[in-house]
Amino acid sequence: MNFTGAELTTWLATLLWPFMRIGAMFAAAPIFSARSVPVRIRIILAFLIAWLLVPVLPAPPAVDLISGEALIISVHQVLIGVAMGFIIQMVFAAFVIAGQSIAMAMGLGFASIIDPQNGLQVPVVSQAFLIMVTLVFLALNGHLVLIDMLAKSFENIPVGMMVPSRDGLWQLVNWGSDMFTGGMLVALPAVAALLLVNLAFGVTTRAAPQLNIFAVGFPVMIMVGLSFIILTLPTITSHLSRLMMQATELIQNFLATA
């Protein structure tokens, strides 16, 4: 069975460019981009998904793989994949922000550990939130939904010279600011309660200056903070579902504006 040079080039282009988009998303999306997932596994998984999608994808543009047009198309595929992964990554970042806000209010901002997923130093509360959100995300089959959206992205933005519009890119910028709002909504009950405790300690200090407020206040702040974290845990699923729905809608709008 003989292949001509043009046929071989077309086959490579059909596989290569989807592989670049999928691989870029895996490099930016949560769970897949974790340091605990070897790069070799990501490459193999991206290659398998691209290979499975090849039969249903439209024909790629007829350009030379060693040309400026091919380089531009490759950059476009990487940017699209990174944008999709970034949108989902921001959902997880909202809970990290919530954990940091609660930890600072509790006085545990100094209690930090290395996040094995990102290799960054984060408070213990943030790491606990991140682990729980990851487990809920997997339990809700979020990783399968992410792969499904990735496959459908080739219908909205097929491999070619098409790029998202300025409106789509502006939506990504606004999404980053929305995550701060989402994180504060998660942390609001605990932070508000700890603020009231601080106000109570301030009044107590004014009424009884001889009281060693530092010896009493720190354990009370930790106890109140942990109590409200426990009360907040049942709402994590609803917060995650809401943010994931918003992220899914944003990805669909982002792809539709191309």
Image: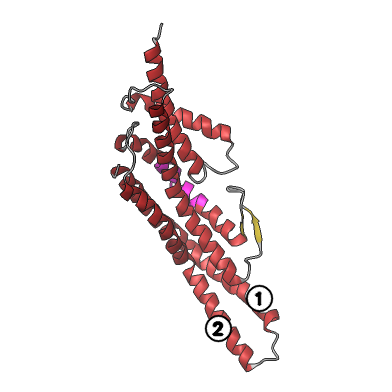
Q: Quadrant of residue 165?
A: top left
Q: The disc labelled 1 sits on which kind of residue?
A: Phe
Residue 245 shows in this picture: no
Q: Quadrant of residue 56?
A: top left
- The single residue placed furthest to the front in the displayed view is 68
Q: The disc labelled 2 sits on which kind of residue?
A: Leu
Q: Earlier in the sequence, mark 1 or mark 2?
A: 2
Q: Is residue 66 above or below residue 176?
A: above
Which residue is at 55% across, 67% downward? 102
Which residue is at 49% across, 53% downward? 92
Foreground: 125 or 233?
A: 125
Q: Is residue 168 left or right of residue 216?
A: left
Foreground: 23 or 92?
A: 23
Question: What secondary structure is marked by label 1?
Answer: helix
Q: Is residue 258 left or right of residue 213?
A: left
Which residue is the site of mark 1? 218
> Where residue 134 sits in the image (x, y, percent)?
51, 50
Mark 1 residue crowding within 10 angstroms, few (<14) / some (14–19) / many (20+): few
Which residue is at 67% across, 83% downward? 213
> Which quarter shows the N terminus?
top left
Foreground: 34 or 242?
A: 34
Please tell me the numbered disc located at residue 199.
2
Residue 108 part of the magenta-drawn span? no
Foreground: 115 or 141?
A: 115
Residue 201 shows in this picture: yes
State how far apart marks 1 and 2 are (Cα): 14 Å
> Where residue 20 sits in the image (x, y, percent)?
45, 32
Q: Are marks 1 and 2 in contact (CB under 8 Å)?
A: no
Provide the residue span drawn in magenta. 134-146
Question: What secondary structure is marked by label 2?
Answer: helix
Magenta stretch mostly in which secondary structure?
A: helix
